[in-house]
Amino acid sequence: MKIAVMGTRGIPARYGGFENFAEELSVRLTQRGHEVTVYCHSRHCPESDRRYRGVRRVVMPEPARPLPKALAYGVLSMLHALFCRYDAVLICRGSNAALAWLPRLAWQKVAVSVDGVDPESASGNSLQQFSRKMANRFASRFANKLITDSEAMADYFRRSYGVQSDIIPYGSRRVSLPPSTALGTWSLQSRQYVLYVGTLLPQNHAHTVIAAYRKSLVDVPLLLIGDAQQDAKYMGYIREQVATVGPMAGSRVILAGTVYGRQLEELMCHTAAFIQSTETGGTHPALLQAMGAGSLVIANDTAAHRQTVGEGGLYYRFNSVTDLAQKIRDAVHRADEFQSIRSKAQQRIESSCSWDIVADRYETLFQAMAS
């Protein structure tokens, strides 16, 4: 089969969840004998190599100034795809769904994997809310197959648009790494820090994590990994919150910026607790990655998180600073008591969310679309 993956920044993955997904999926499908093409943005993938780990790369040039860069990149990618006779086209991110009709002009079958964000509950201004709803409407209308990553998001599309979706979760893998350079970079010790990973946006509740950490009075650092490119005002608020922490022996908040790859996996393997504080969305890639690394997950109590984590983590009352603070104290002071929960998280990844299982599901989907 000839399969195209577009809508990401490209491979090798250097940015976020969808880029990692594109690499993991395309490499596995290529190893199974399929011809897979991943469309890449020249700014994020400057290499000139046409192949990466066996996967064909089409690197699109920097778009012209008059058009928004993301829109122009999507249009150029899909126009290129019109002449390639793919058996299946996978468009990542619901925001690209408005262009899904373009490959269909060439009778190509199109699947859209939507973002795991419910516009009705997500934070943001009215324009952002409207944009999310329109993207989901386009995905429902133009895709031959709609892909959601959790039952919660599948239910949203059933209720809102009367559309059935194929539920395929994001993937992860089981890892166990010894302490190495990542811990040394931030002067950390194994099981002696608390970890948050995610884009710094209001709906992801980094401010709640900081407030709970401050209230917990634990004497280990809090490491915040993520960027705030989309909301400079909120980042300013986070910096103000960080400045209020301490002084206390051992307590400090570290704004680490973006961290990927082996360094991030090492940090997840050795944290006392991984805080999943998001209040919206489906399967969060960092959450699955933390579970695969054997982190003690402490998750905001939402339906989506319970569907993902099951018995492989702890939960705090929805957006409760007080309850999260208590869970952080327990994780730091009673670390040895939670080894069975860590093991359950890794077992859950192996049984239902491994990248091989995800590749199986997508391969079956593409074969059904092509036939």
Image (cartoon, helix red, strand yellow):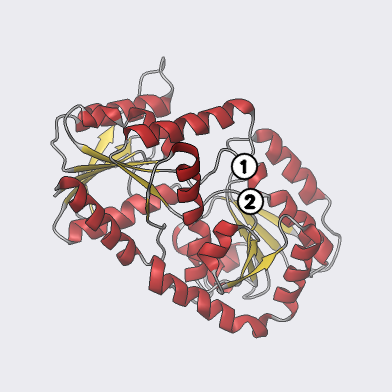
Nearer the observer, 334 or 321:
321
- At 54% from the left edge and 74% from the top edge, which residue is drawn? 179
> Does 217 sit left or right of 85 as displayed?
right
Q: CA distance from mark 1 to mark 2?
A: 8 Å
| Residue furthest right as drawn | 247
Q: What crowding class fits label 2: few (fewer than 14 Cα within 10 Å), some (14-19), or many (20 or more)?
A: many
Q: Is residue 227 above or below residue 247?
A: above
- At 72% from the left edge and 81% from the top edge, which residue is drawn? 334
| Residue furthest top as drawn | 66
Q: Position of residue 362 (x, y in %)?
A: 28, 55
Question: Label 2 amino acid?
Answer: Glu
Q: Position of residue 290 (x, y in %)?
A: 52, 66
Q: Is residue 64 above or below residue 302?
A: above
> Does 101 sit left or right of 84 as displayed?
right
Q: What crowding class fits label 1: few (fewer than 14 Cα within 10 Å), some (14-19), or many (20 or more)?
A: few
- Please tell me in which quadrant of the rendered image residue 239 appears: top right
Helix, strand or loop for disc 2: loop
Q: Is residue 306 above or below residue 153?
A: below
The image's mark for residue 121 is 1
Residue identified by numbered label 2: 279
Q: Are marks 1 and 2 in contact (CB under 8 Å)?
A: yes
Q: Position of residue 153 (x, y in %)?
A: 49, 49
Q: Position of residue 278 (x, y in %)?
A: 62, 52
Helix, strand or loop for disc 1: loop
